[in-house]
Image: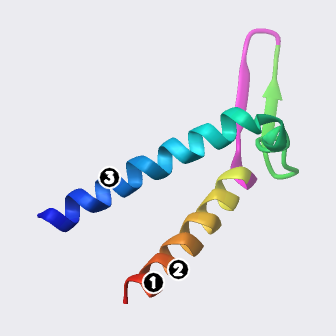
């Protein structure tokens, strides 16, 4: 159980670091959500946004991070 709490603390610290990074350097990520595969449909009374390309990019980054983390643990 002690290792699980260390993992949760590590994840929390990682989220704090990511939050500070995006707060300080938020302008670097202004392109995110405006990728060519992101779908935006705007009408008179509605707005539909489907960030398909952005979610694929996040999925790839998370998979690479998990892969590296698994090899780092072993």
Q: Which residues are magenta?
A: 44-53
Tag 2 secondary structure: helix
The reply to whether discs 3 and 2 touch (Cβ–Cβ < 8 Å) is no
Q: Farthest residue to the top: give it.
A: 45
The reply to whether discs 1 and 3 touch (Cβ–Cβ < 8 Å) is no
Tag 3 secondary structure: helix
Tag 1 secondary structure: helix
Q: Position of residue 67 (x, y in %)?
A: 51, 80
The label nearer to you, 1 versus 2, is 1
Q: Which mark is residue 68?
A: 2
Q: Is residue 71 left or right of residue 74?
A: right
Look at the picture and state if 19 lies above or below 12. Answer: above
| CA distance separating discs 1 and 3 | 18 Å
| Residue under label 3 | 9
- Looking at this view, is 63 or 17 the one in front? 17
| Residue under label 1 | 72
């Amino acid at each position: 159980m002690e290792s699980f709490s260390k993992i949760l603390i590590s994840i929390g610290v990682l989220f704090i670091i990511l939050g500070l990074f995006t707060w300080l350097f938020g302008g670097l990520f202004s392109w995110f959500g405006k990728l060519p595969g992101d779908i935006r449909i705007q009408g008179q009374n509605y707005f539909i946004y489907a960030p398909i390309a952005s979610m694929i990019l996040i999925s790839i980054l998370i998979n690479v991070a998990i892969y590296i983390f698994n090899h780092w643990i072993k």
